[in-house]
Amino acid sequence: MKAVTPRTMQEIDRRAIEDEGIPGLQLMENAGRSCVAAIMDESGLQGAGQAVVLAGKGNNGGDGYVIARLLHEQGWRVKVLVLAEQGQITGDAAANLIRLPLAMISFCPDESRLAQHGDELCRADLIMDALLGTGLNSTITGVYRTAVELVNSSGRPILSVDIPSGIHGTTGMIMGDAVRASLTVTFALPKLGLILFPGAEHVGKLVVADIRIPPHIIQAAPGFEILDAAAVRPLLRRRDRRAHKGSFGHCLIVAGSPGKTGAAAMSANSAVRTGSGLVSLTVAASLNPILEVKTTEAMTIPLPDSGSGHLDLSVRAEIEKLLPGRDAVALGPGLDRRPETALLVRSLVETITAPLVIDADGLNAVAEDVGVLLRKKSPSLVLTPHPGEMGRLLGASVPEIEANRIAVAQEFARTYGIYLILKGARTIIASPDGAIAINTSGNPGMASGGMGDVLTGILVSLLGQGYPAWDACRLGVFLHGYAGDMVADDKGEIGMNATDVQEMLPYACKRLFMQPLSDTAPKTLTQFIQ
């Protein structure tokens, strides 16, 4: 499934109405009916209950009027609180408003009139948030801000129509305050603001409803791929029964320094756990005895270091001799930030022709001369920065990066012709051609040291096994988070570590194989993510 911006969704609606001749009133009716269907499926309420619908003056409010009418017809006791004067409601919304019994409606254009209905909100079996749609682009104030506060403090189940009011539909930012929904029913396609944090924390269970927009319009619309188990499952390859270790690639990892041998070991061991046929780990000679203990299946290759434990430009020729026959290379985990080591990293970027992953101190080395990316030899270069590393690559602050993660990743990948994995909650994956994927796996328990080293090992393993770079990035990022989610299910989020995730990788692959292949048939209601 893909996510779209509100602007794209507006164009989808326009095409459905103008090109296909579907009346806007019919789309609004379909939207309202899908919300009522979700209420019946998800609320757990037995029979008719008591509902309060809070409606704005736009089409989101119009959806709310349809919901109110349909619930009323099913025997529900319904109160509709309209945050406007009647004369401010126009178009399709007005056409649905006049279909409601007058006794059901209270017009509350200011805080004082709205406050009179606080008790009704607290007594409701269900509150319907139809205040503000996906077009919100300014901080909410006045009666709308008061309404959000009343809804959130009610303690009642809340269904948000299309998007919880107060969330920016493109960035997921909270525009002053936002409804915290129990269930959100969005229409045709999920909007970016529902997927990206912090907005995603307000969504509750997300249901994507088919409101009968022709499939060819939806398929033609530009969007952003959402990575869940069903989407990623087709990427994971089953093994040929006749395979041998040479069938699954030989990857080379350049890593480690004093105090950071764990990073080197975790990346190598994670490559093994992701299915590499052979893994070689190049380390400073004085660290080799330590890495011999920390790794078993991976082979270590000691390089001259004069006893310092650090690699520098003097070992470039030795590393270049190792490159033939290696199917993928990783640079960076635990290498340290010494200027001499940074020179080695940048030199290797200009030399290595195999698929290449750069992480951690490798990224810090690149940040000192980002132009080296334009001199790369690898046709499949993958960078895996967290926001701080991304800030160093761009010379920008972390808040600047976090405020527009998709645009930052997309522009950087296009500019330098690389694959960029911008890590964090909802990791963003960008390809050189501008494609974007948004990952949904992972959890806060993974916010601990070594997790990035595990991801590096996963990625270099998949590239070494011959996965195309775009597939390797999407599969690798999802698999990393998926294994983390399995650890959290078993142990909880607090105290899980990177080795836990590394050891869970084979089980994650096994579970992923058990997922059904994506079903592309239209569905009336699809539970997307909880």
Image: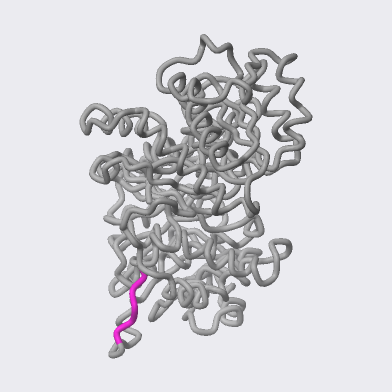
Left or right side of 379 for 118: right
Give how far across and how far down residue 21 sits, in percent: 23, 30
Residue ID at (51%, 41%): 194
Left or right side of 320 for 113: right
Is 210 drawn above or below residue 478 in the view shown? above
Left or right side of 64 for 467: left
In the current view of this chain or complex, which residue is farthest to the top?
87
Residue ID at (52%, 68%): 267
Residue 173 shows in the view: yes
Residue ID at (64%, 13%): 109
Q: Does the magenta stretch include residue 187?
A: no
Q: What stretch is highlighted in magenta?
A: 236-240
Q: What is the quadrant of residue 104 in the picture?
A: top right
Q: Which one is in front, 313 or 271?
A: 271
Give how far across and how far down residue 26 sits, in percent: 35, 33
Q: Which one is in front, 438 or 143?
A: 143
Q: Which one is in front, 241 or 260?
A: 241
How many badges with numbers are in the image? 0
Give how far across and how far down residue 115 sits, in percent: 75, 20
Residue 318 shows in the view: no
Magenta stretch secondary structure, dominant: loop
Left or right side of 527 for 414: left
